[in-house]
Image: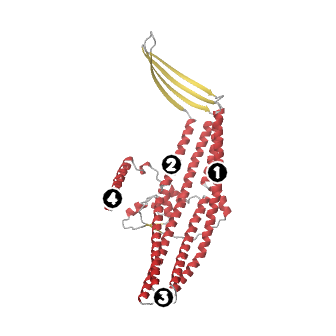
Amino acid sequence: MKSKPWLKAGVPLVALLVASPGAQAAELSLQEAINMALSQNTGIKVTQKGEDTAKYALEEARGNNGFSVGLSDSLSTSKNNGADRQDSNSLSLTGKLPLYSGGKNQANIKKAKMGVESASLETQRAREDLKLKVIKAYYDALEAKKTVAVRQETADKYQEHYTNVSQLYAAGSKAKIDVIRSQVELSDARQNLIKAENSYEVDLAILRNYLNIDRSEPLQLTTDFSYLPFGQDMGTCLDYAYSNRKDLLVDKKKWEQQEQAIKAARSGYLPSLNLSVGLSESQRFHPDSDNSHGTSATLGLSWDIFDSGVTRAQVKTAETSRDVAKLNYLKDKEQIDLDVRQAYYNMREAEKRFNSTQDAVHQAEEDAFIAREKYRAGEGLMLDIIDAQEALSTARLNYISAQYDYARYKATVENAMGIELTPEEKEAASHLDTDADRALSQSELGSSNDTTADSSRNVADELAGNEGNQ
């Protein structure tokens, strides 16, 4: 199902509902939910700020290798014994350009460029992970909704059976114990229904949180389970993951960054060469006036011949960080291998359960019907009905669970492989609003804190009143 234009533009769902006062619950497909999360999720905004930080670090590294200008001004006064006090002012303008830094500045620039690439990859991976979370939350809510339907039907069946047994008991054809037992089973069924309804509300709350919409917004999920076979084998999935997982690519970049850090540290063994040019003006205005102007150009060579092992320690530290980055890359590669295998095996297991449980539902429905009719005719036992109804509920829940387990694990496999977002999802992600005016101003925060404080006092007063009444 194609996303609506307002979703592609990143328009909040609450705005749509405000524009449609008669709407009771917004229809939301899975793809629309993914697009909405990619364009509105606060966690993604936080991650994307890392790209800005990396860009500024690159600007700093380039600036350290560029031309710089400094201005200084000083006012001085002095007096020696037997002489008049002297007052003077000195003004200087100096420009500096590093000609050679032993490779330090160039290494830092390369390292910063890799940092920008890493930050972009981290944002892309965060989007992929968010997509998986939305898919899971969406299917969790759908499964919970179907579970509610099964629990509701079970409770209705027990209510119908309880009514029937009560009538038979009143007619003298059934014992009191049958009435009691059917009432107990009805109570248990209602308890399971209450729990299922609560799970559904919790799953919807989780989904709303990922979408960053009004947490009480009514939703109607329109994308149901659809079986789509997964054709790739395990080896293909692993090979693809090794080449495309963004977090593994980030590990490679960090490894390469540490190689540049070693080059920057080793520059301490080499000399540095700087060019400085300056203009200066000095004016003495007491006891008499005297002005002087000057220009200068300096080519300075600096070389630390002996630093008590400081440079050597910096190099060793950088080499250790490089080794750690390499080990982290290998460790994450091993974890990716495990993630792909676990998700793949779980997906295939759910697929087998999905194919085997459908027949079990039909058989359980037939068995439950026979048990009820036999009991109604006076030939069956209460235990037969209870067992048959329990078996039917279990079969239906197993079938529902297998369906959505397969859908979730299939999405998990694709995420573990590092499959990137679709063009439509990238378009939605490009509308992520990170402007400062979207954040709360200090005045808004202040008023919010005041409101929260008032609310807290009201709740405290209410609780205190309740305790007093007790």
In the image, what residue type sits under mark 3? Arg
Relative depth, front residue between 395 and 11: 395
- Residue 235 x/y as whole percent: 68, 62
Q: In front: mark 1 or mark 3?
A: 3
Read off the residue under disc 1: 329
SS class, disc 4:
helix
The residue pinned by badge 3 equals: 376
Residues under numbered marks 1 and 4 in contact, where contact means CB atoms less than 8 Å apart: no
According to the picture, the residue beneath numbered tag 2 turns out to be 49
Disc 1 is placed on an element classified as helix
In terms of depth relative to the viewer, which is nearer, 165 or 194? 165
CA separation in Å, label 1 and label 4: 56 Å
Check contact, mark 1 vs mark 3: CB within 8 A.
Answer: no
Which of discs 2 and 3 lies nearer the camera? The answer is 3
Q: How many marks?
A: 4
Q: Which mark is residue 462?
A: 4
The earlier-in-sequence mark between 1 and 3 is 1
Distance from the alpha carbon under mark 1 to that under mark 3: 68 Å
